[in-house]
Amino acid sequence: MKNILVTGYRAHELGISNQKHQGITYIKKAIAAQLIPLIEDGLAWVITPGQYGVDLWACEVGLELKKQYPHLKVAILAAYSNPEAKWKEDKQNYYRQIVQTVDYYGLVSKEPYSGIWQLRARDDLLFKKTDGMLLFYDEEAGEASPRYFKERALKLQQQTGYRLLTIQAEDIQNIADDEQMNQYEQG
């Protein structure tokens, strides 16, 4: 796999309202754990839609992994211009900081949001440009925005062999439990 789409929950779907939330650390560790073997096997690009949540945390992980794997590139393919315009100022600043540090930032439509067609066109491009997807989505926790990505990836998997890797809530909880156990043993 050369290019992977990484996406999943939006922050609000996880009950995360700011960048200081402890859960982000565990989510990022789960993303890194999935990406490292792929990078060592030739992964070249981590590509996200750039939504506030798993997408941007994956960008952070990719940017951090570039220190160890300099060939790795990170990209955001956004659906329309200024997707962060209605976010709170701290989230806007965070987004803009990430956008400035990724290797590639592209817009499917150079216009502000004008309709669902922009999101569909973005998703078409994301699937066209990637060989597989790493998705943080847990259906048992209830339906959420990543459902569409999963359905589409499963169809592509049957048609073309598109790869679907997943992170589930249990994976995040296991990382958190391991860390707490390590802290307990050290303390």
Image (cartoon, rainbow, N blue to C red):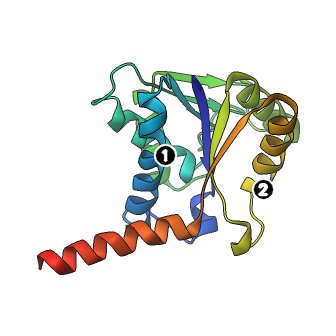
In terms of depth relative to the viewer, which is nearer, 187 or 89?
187
Q: Residue at x 45, y 55 (%)?
A: 30
Q: Does the image show residue 115?
A: no
For label 1, the residue is: 34
Quadrant location of the N terminus in the rendered image: top right
Residue found farthest to the left: 187
Q: Is residue 100 left or right of residue 168?
A: left
User: Is residue 141 visible in the rendered structure shown here?
Assistant: yes
Task: Report how far apart the C-alphas of labels 1 and 2 lie in the structure.
Answer: 20 Å
The disc at residue 111 is: none
* Residue 131, percent from left and from top: 67, 28
SS of the residue under disc 1: helix
What amino acid is found at the position of numbered circle 2 in the picture? Arg
Residue behind mark 2: 147
Question: How many residues crowd around disc 1 within 10 Å: few (fewer than 14), some, or many (20 or more)?
Answer: some
Give the residue displayed 41% in from the left and 29% down from the top. 40
Q: Quadrant of the C terminus?
A: bottom left
The residue mark sitting in front, 1 or 2, is 1
Work out whether 92 lies above or below 49: below
Label 2 CA crowd tier, 10 Å (few <14, some 14–19, many 20+): some
Q: Which residue is at 75% across, 72% downward?
A: 142
The residue located at (40%, 29%) in the rendering is: 101
Q: Identify the element where label 2 is drawn.
A: helix
Q: Disc 1 residue type?
A: Gln
Disc nearer the start of the sequence (1/2): 1
